[in-house]
Amino acid sequence: MTEKFVRYAVDQEGVARITLDHPQTRNALSDELLDELLSVLSRAMHDEAARVVVLTSSHERIFSSGGNLNAFADDRPPITKYGELDRFPRLFKLIGALGKPVICAANGDVLAGALGLALACDLVIAKESVRFGCPEINVGAFPFMISALIYRNVNRMKANELMMLGELITAEQASDLGFVNKVVPDDEFDETVASWAHKVATKSPLLMRLGKDAINATRDLALHEALDALQAQLALAFTTEDLAEGVRAFREKRQPEWRMR
């Protein structure tokens, strides 16, 4: 499909940049934009040149304003609306199953459903001027779909505060709550994102995929079940040439040559 609202590009270092690009709506997560995002993420999953994905925005101040409010109050039958609500779950599941690290480069405010999008990513880097929040309750809605992600990343009482008061928090406050990895002065943001992305891209894509798959499969399991599954994944990692190559390169004080096998 030809994308109108999402841009995709991969650099020579293996960094795939996915840019939300519908500034007229402040990158509202409309059905059309979500469909394009799902398509582009699937493209990144199968793109051998892509080793890490950076998700960002072309808007000067807004990463995304969240779900499309116009769709909340339109006159479609409830059963039709229900049938179209699967885009967010599919999106969050796809990011988890991508097999490649996804960095949310929050270069603008991350609001409502977009907070769920950020929390589904593996790493979050934010400009210090950026705000995060769930203002849905202020317009008579509630962050139903993203509450599962909020509860998995934020202390229960603070999660309730975010969702029930509907107030925005700063990037520093988001970092204190534990769901932003790094807060960066605005003029250093692009350089920091590029540095992190290129650093991740130098790691073994095979071991990174095995590791992300293991995390995705076990994070909600009981401890004994998770340990059994992780033991099997570690045994699988021992069979790879990349693991042996990484150890050899470390001992020989050189850069490893990943073979993806």
Image (cartoon, rainbow, N blue to C red):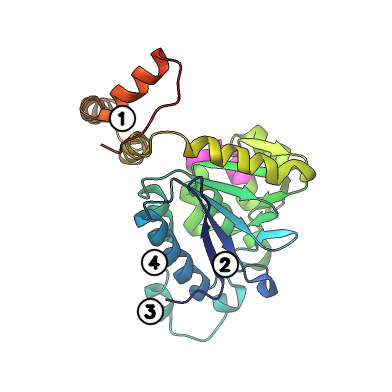
Mark 1–mark 3 Cα distance, whole angstroms, equals 50 Å
Q: Position of residue 122 (x, y in %)?
A: 49, 42
Q: Amino acid at mark 4?
A: Asp
248 lies left or right of 4: left
Mark 3–mark 4 Cα distance, whole angstroms, equals 12 Å
Give the SS element for disc 2.
loop
Mark 2–mark 3 Cα distance, whole angstroms, equals 18 Å
Q: Give the mark toward the camera: 2 or 3.
A: 2
State yes or no: residue 137 in magenta.
no
Q: Which residue is mark 3?
A: 79
N-terminal of the pair, mark 4 or mark 1, is: 4
Circle on res. 86: 4
209 lies left or right of 105: left
Give the SS element for disc 3.
helix
Circle on res. 242: 1
Which residue range is magenta in the image? Answer: 152-161
Residue at image position (50%, 74%) is 3
N-terminal of the pair, mark 4 or mark 2, is: 2
